[in-house]
Image (cartoon, rainbow, N blue to C red):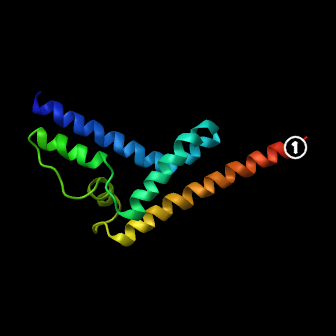
Amino acid sequence: MSTLFYHRLADLLVLLHLTFVLFVLFGGLLILKWPWVMWLHLPAASWGALIEFTGWICPLTPLEQWLRETGGGRGYQSGFIEHYVLPLLYPAGLTGRVQVVLGLLVLLLNCGVYLLVFRRRRQSMQRP
């Protein structure tokens, strides 16, 4: 296979990874319109928070690095968040403290959304 093929697959994987990160952060808002999304979002948000709290590397990151290296490019040593997202948000590198803050952000944001949804449901069930 051509090196361009591996580069394109790596780029596609980056988009998929970014989409997943955005779903982890904001997917709870989708349940306001489509309640069934909760069954997809809860495991995704749990996984995202677990990755941040433990400092683990998402399996998509080594796959992307392998695709880039197989295509003749250079991989990177950090994780996806540190390599792509943090340079947009923070000038410094990813630290353990920042990871905990990101994990808490995921939990707090989504807990707030779910609390709002459950309150709306309770109110709509109590109406005659």
Q: Position of residue 16 (x, y in %)?
A: 35, 39
Report the amino acid beneath label 1. Answer: Arg
- Compared across the picture, whether 35 is left or right of 62 comes to right
Q: Quadrant of the C terminus?
A: top right
Q: Position of residue 57 (x, y in %)?
A: 31, 55
Q: Is residue 45 above or below residue 86?
A: above
Q: Position of residue 82 (x, y in %)?
A: 29, 59
User: Which residue extends farthest left?
Assistant: 72
Q: Quadrant of the N terminus?
A: top left
Is residue 84 in view? yes
- Compared across the picture, whether 65 is left or right of 96 comes to left
Q: Is residue 34 above or below residue 20?
A: above
Is residue 34 in view? no
- Compared across the picture, whether 45 is left or right of 87 comes to right
Q: Which residue is mark 1?
A: 127
Which secondary structure lies at badge 1? loop
Residue at left 35%, top 63%? 55
Q: Is residue 10 above or below residue 2?
A: below
Residue at left 14%, top 32%? 4
Q: State the residue in front, 42 or 113.
A: 42
User: Which residue extends farthest bottom?
Assistant: 97
Residue at left 44%, top 67%? 101
Residue at left 31%, top 66%? 94
Q: Position of residue 85 (x, y in %)?
A: 33, 55
Q: Quadrant of residue 33?
A: top right
